Image: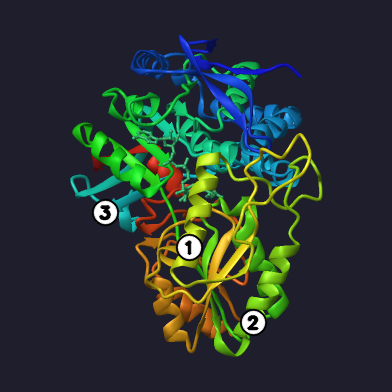
Amino acid sequence: MGRTRIQHFIDGRFEPGSSDFTLINPASGRDYGSCALAGPALVDEAVGAARKALSGPWARLSLDDRLDLLEAVALGIERRAKEFVRAEILDTGKPLSAASAIDIPRGIQNFRFFARLARTHGTDSFATGSFATGAFPGASAGSSGSLNYTLREPVGVVGVICPWNLPLLLMTWKVAPALACGNTVVVKPSEETPATASLLADVMNEVGLPAGVYNVVHGYGPDSAGEAIVRHPDVDALTFTGESRTGERILADAAPHLKSTSFELGGKNAALVFADCDFERAVEGTIRSVFSNCGQVCLCSERVYVERPIFERFAEALAQRATALRVGDPWDPNTAMGPLISAQHRDKVLGMWQQARDDGGDVLCGGAAHTIAGDELSGGYFVQPTVVTGLPETAAFVRNEVFGPSCHIAPFDDEDEAVRLANDSDYGLCAAVWTSDLNRAHRAAAGLHVGMVWVNSWMLRDLRTPFGGRGRSGVGREGGVHSLDFYSELKNVCVAL
Ligand code: NAD
Ligand code: 6OD
């Protein structure tokens, strides 16, 4: 297999750009290709193409024809699923099992789901006066009333700025509803993971998406392609997934143009494990919620609170199962955990684990880099699944997002304390509650200051539901009709009758 060379995609054509940056495979630490780097001029070209496409053949397609194209995109990804899986693994190092069973299928599902939703979802209408009471046609001429109805129109050019942890899944989560609503997009994938956005461009051409509807520019954030999209006056809306601090900066940069924004940001999510839970199910679920994607999912549980009577047993079981997780070669079907995304991120995670030790934490398992002998993977950014206990709630490891395969585990004595501990965070993305008491589950869910609560499960997704967080975890909601609303301008028409 030759070296990968990824290009921009503007107005239906791949473009090399004038300079490149190097792509590193996190499982080996080696350079495996290069990616074109865009500056403001190329971003301007992409935004211009997207703007022009808003009044071209795309705008003249019937809703059915537009949505048929999205269904064709889903089929196109499905046909080339192996290529997508390979590209995602090379970029992220995630295990084959995850890329082939979660990331790529969800990319396909995002297009199918939003195509179907937009086909069937209507808009509001409200009637007043005699028109509302059904008195027509008997009502006399001149009686007053009104009929209001809502039109759904595209917002325009949408800037889509994506992270590296679930590249295709999170990008299509935004691109699919944006296109379903008739917008055009300029996507900037993470500089760490540009490959699947580029493969998707190929699929867009194959299915005949009009030129300029889907554009991809590659590069970094500040002073690079990301910032150029955010500041561009012709970008009407911005949808961003990434770190909370990046969200702050993007919001400030977007302010002069009052762009509509949707932000899915970081998390410091709690799992509450009550003594009456199904113990096995709670251990397995918590293992999944802490270590999936090497802990690099915004929804991962990083704070696990366990009711005191089962605390010791639960902590021991968690550490034991964590230690048994197979870390290593992403291509091995039995691998549970691949590497972290980059050397820089690995160093950050290892630094936070060291800080946890320095602050008096007791490391129940892991806490170090995971070394693999042999030529191929010895330079990869692997770390051990890690469980820490004994830290005060004020410790950095308990307060700040790690985004690695680790959690802090601490005991609680009653329901009120559990909910109070979970809520003691600047973030508010999600929580998991493990209990067999139905009333407690509903009470806890109501008391938690987060956007999403899972009861006796984690990341069980229904794409119709609102997705997003409170506090430092985000602004707005996407998912189902909430996505349609963000990616549309709703226009009310009021007719006096
Ligand atoms: P990041 O904020 O570093 O980067 C995300 C994207 O923003 C990248 O494409 C980057 O190039 C771009 N960017 C950075 N600075 C920018 C700027 N000033 N202007 C414009 N673009 C800019 O995040 P990351 O490290 O790629 O992803 C990990 C973070 O994302 C974690 O904090 C995680 O919790 C969060 N995340 C949240 C969700 C969610 O749904 N809430 C989902 C996935 C990841
Ligand atoms: O499942 C989704 O739709 C979604 N947005 C997941 C986000 C995961 C964060 O890393």
Q: Residue at x 35, y 56 (%)?
A: 472
The image quadrant of residue 315 is bottom right
Among numbered discs 1 and 3, the one appearing first in the sequence: 3
Where residue 158 appears, as percent x and y from the top left, is 39, 30
Compare marks 3 and 2 and give the one earlier in the sequence.
3
Badge 3 density bin: few <14, some 14–19, many ≥20, Cα 10 Å: some
Q: Quadrant of the N terminus?
A: top right
> Closer to the camera, 461 or 191?
191
Q: What residue is shown at x 35% (from left), y 42% (from top)?
A: 246
398 and 364: which is toward the camera: 364
- Foreground residue, 241 or 141? 241
Query: Label 2 sits on what residue type?
Result: Cys
- The amino acid marked with disc number 3 is Thr
Q: What element carries label 2?
A: loop
Q: Is residue 86 above or below residue 410?
A: above
Task: Tell me where residue 358 appears, x and y as whole percent.
Answer: 45, 66
List the residue tagged with mark 2: 277
What is the total number of numbered labels drawn onto the structure image? 3
Residue at mark 3 to residue at mark 2: CA–CA distance: 52 Å
Could you tell whether 66 is left or right of 40 in the image? right
Task: Specify the quarter for ligand 1.
Answer: top left
Residue at the spot of label 1: 430
Q: Position of residue 331 (x, y in %)?
A: 78, 40
Q: Looking at the picture, how far across and down is residue 476, in whole percent?
A: 36, 50
Nearest to N terminus: mark 2 or mark 1:
2
Badge 3 is on which residue? 128
